[in-house]
Image: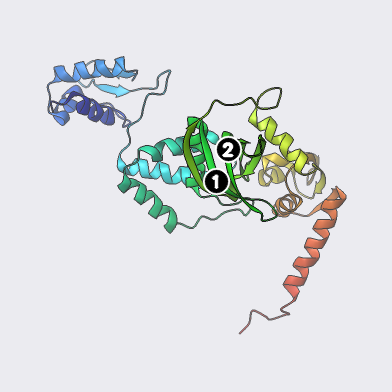
Amino acid sequence: MTDTPARLLNLLSLLQTPREWPGSELAERLDVSPRTIRRDIDRLRDLGYPVEASRGSVGGYRLVAGTAMPPLLLDDEEAVAIAVGLRAGAGHAIEGVDEASVRALAKLEQVLPSRLRHRVSSLQKATVPLTRGDGSTIDPQTLTVIASTVTGREQLRFAYRSGDGTASKRQVEPYRLVSTGSRWYLVAYDLDREDWRTFRVDRVSNPFATGARFTPRELPTESGDAAEFFARSMSRMQPDLRIDVTFRAPADFVTARLPASLGVPESTGEHSCRLRSVSSDSLEWVALRLALVDCEFTAHGPSSLVTYLSDLGARLTRASSAAGPGADQK
C-alpha cells in the first residue's frame, strides 16, 4: 500500500480496536515494512493520537486514552449502530440526552454515505420503541437540522403549530436547543416578530437551513444562559405548580420512579415519604407521572392538581366499568 493517507487511515482503524498489535502483524496487514509502520506510528502521534509501544518479543502498539479527543474511525456497522442509538434517544427526548447528543448525531449523519443513511432510516422505521408516554415523539431529522443551524449560526425557516392549533411560518436565528427530559425546545430570535421566542420542537415541521449566516445576539438574561431564559419563558406561559404529595411507599422506591425534574421526596417513615417541589410542567403531565409511580398517594396541593386527579380517577373508573362484568368473555 503506497498511498500514505489511505495507509494511515487503515492503520488507525486497526489501532482503534481494543487490543495490542505486533508491528510485524501490522506490516503484514498493510503490506509494508516494519520500518514504514514505525514511521506511520510517529505520524499518528504528531496528529495527536496517543499510540503506546511496548518492547520485547511479544511487544506491539496500541491506542491509549489521551488528554484530547482525536477523530474516530468507524466501520459501517459501528456507524449505523451509533446513529440509530442517537436517533432513538434524541427523538424521544430521553432524560439525560441533551444538545451534545444531537450535535453528535448531526455531525455523524452529515458524513454518512447514502447507503448507510438509508440503512439507518430503514432500521428506524422498522423498529417500534416502547416509550413511557411522558413526552412527544420528534423526527430526529428535525433535531439534526436545527442543531446544525445552531452550530453553524445559520438562519432557520420552519412551519410551526402553536398550542391552540394555529399554523404559521417562522424564520429565526437559532440560539440553543434545550431538553427538559420530556420535550425538546428551541430558543431563537424570531426575525418577523423582532423578539426572542421559545418553540416546542415537536410542533416544528419542514425545517430548512437557509444558508444565511448571522452573528448571535445576546440573550436578554443576566447570565446569557439559554436554560435560564427558557425557564423564565415557561414561567410566563403557565404558573408553577407547588406540588405537595404523600406517598405510601419508601422514599427510594418513589425516587426511582419519579422524573428528576419533579424533585426528590423526603422520607417520613419506613413505608412513606412526602414530595414538596415546584414544577413548571403541565398539570396533566405531573398527574400522569404521579400515577405512574405505582403506589398509593395523597395529593395535598395545589388545588388544581387535587381536582384534576379526582376527575381523572372518576373518568378511569367509568371507563373500567362501562363494559360491565364479563366483557372480555366471548
Can residue 279 be seen in this snapshot?
no
* Quarter holding residue 241: top right
Residue at position x 51%, y 37% in the image = 147
Image position of 143 (left or right of 66) = right
Q: Position of residue 180 (x, y in %)?
A: 64, 40
Q: Amino acid at mark 1?
A: Phe
- Percent position of residue 232, x then y: 74, 34
As drawn, the label of residue 158 is 1
Residue in the foreground of this view, choosing between 300 and 254: 300
Nearer the N terminus, badge 2 or badge 1? 1
**Could you tell me which quadrant the N terminus lies in?**
top left
Query: Is 223 placed left or right of 118 in the picture?
Result: right
Instruction: Name the residue type under label 2.
Output: Val
Tell me residue 153's x, y (percent).
51, 30
Taking the spot 30% from the left edge, 39% from the top edge, the residue there is 75
- Mark 1: few/some/many CA within 10 Å (<14, 14-19, 20+): some
Q: Residue furthest bottom?
A: 330
In the rendered image, the residue lying farthest to the front is 192
| Way the structure is coloured | rainbow
Work out whether 5 lies above or below 182.
above
Q: Depth check: 22 or 219 in front?
A: 219
Write down the residue under mark 2: 172
For the residues bearing labels 2 and 1, Cβ distance under 8 angstroms: yes
Quarter that holds the C terminus: bottom right
Residue at 36% across / 41% down in the picture?
A: 79
Label 1 element class: strand
Residue 192: which disc? none
**In the figure, 1 relative to 48: above or below?**
below
SS type, badge 2: strand
Can residue 40 be seen in the rendering of this structure? yes
Q: Nearer the viewer, residue 12 or 147?
A: 147
